[in-house]
Image (cartoon, rainbow, N blue to C red):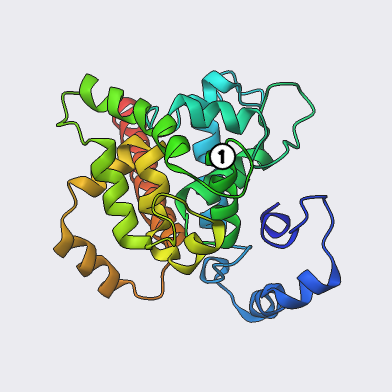
Amino acid sequence: MRIFYSLDTNDDSKITFRDFNKSNLKDALFQVSVEEDINKVKDFFSYEHFYVIYCKFWELDSDHDFLLSKEDFSKYEGYTLCKKAVERIFMQIPRKFKSKMKDTMCFEDFLAFIISEEDKTTDIAIKYWFSILDLDQNDIIGPHEMEYFYEEQLTRLEFLNHEPILFGDILCQINDIFKPAKEGNYSIEILKSHREFCPLFFNSLVNLNKFVAFEQRDVMAIKHDLLDNPNMNDWDRFVQTEYARLSMEDENNEDVVFSYLE
């Protein structure tokens, strides 16, 4: 699933030789053949990556039927995604679901979502979120589309007693960063040319927790993390944090069991 997410550029469950040849899959296969620790192979084969994706899916799958309803999925990271984005995902706008059950997301669908969600700097992720925001499908995200999504963010900020940030201020900030030829109009090429800022662009419109975290960010802490892990991308950092959390939870659960037995 991870290989097809990265290499199946036409999203037709096929990998062309051209896409295979352009990818780093060959290098990863050679690395797997000589590396004793599978977790050192970050691309495609890391057990830690699989474990985090599986556990995040399992946490949402309340009835454990290995399918996520829209209600299940909405709970991701404490309802961090706006409802409008969730609706678009379940309309299968960014990616057709592999699930055979109507109105449900299977594990493969969730894998495509979570990798695109946690690292919004890749071409695949940028295309995923761009299609969600491009309501009229004219290959431009304009101010009316941005405001359509942001109005839900603003309502939620006010509900949580956060100081509201006006849409005009957000638009001004984004214009200053991306400098589009026409203010407020963003093509996918413009976003890709400033991909390091794409998480800010998308999160400000669809992800409340990450948007708030950015507004309250500790710049020095961010710089320190980047210096400590210069070769890690956003996905690797997410997995590292989540794997540590899940491992700690497992240890605590074991301690509780042993205490009970004693």
Identity of the residue drawn at 85% across and 72% down:
17
Q: Is residue 32 left or right of residue 42?
A: right
In this rendering, the count of numbered labels is 1
The answer to whether residue 134 is above or below residue 151 is: below
Q: Percent x, y for residue 176?
A: 29, 60
> Residue 212 sits in which quadrant?
top left
Question: In this view of the protein, can residue 186 be seen by the observer?
Answer: yes
Q: The residue tagged with tag 1: helix, strand or loop?
A: helix
Q: Percent x, y for residue 251?
A: 35, 43
Neighbours of disc 1 within 10 Å: few (<14), some (14-19), many (20+):
many
Q: Percent x, y for residue 68?
A: 61, 26
Give the residue type that dot 1 points to: Ile
Q: Is residue 197 left or right of residue 119?
A: left
- Quick one: 203 or 149, which is closer to the camera? 149
Q: Percent x, y for residue 62?
A: 53, 20
> Residue 99 sits in which quadrant?
top right
Q: Is residue 113 left or right of residue 159?
A: right
Identity of the residue drawn at 39% across and 39% down:
205
Question: In this view of the protein, can residue 60 be seen by the observer?
Answer: no
Identity of the residue drawn at 32% across and 61% down:
177
Q: Quadrant of the C terminus?
A: top left
The answer to whether residue 187 is above or below residue 220 is: above
- Quick one: 15 or 255, which is closer to the camera? 15
- Quick one: 207 or 249, which is closer to the camera? 207
Pointer 1: what residue?
132
The answer to whether residue 171 is above or below residue 81 is: below
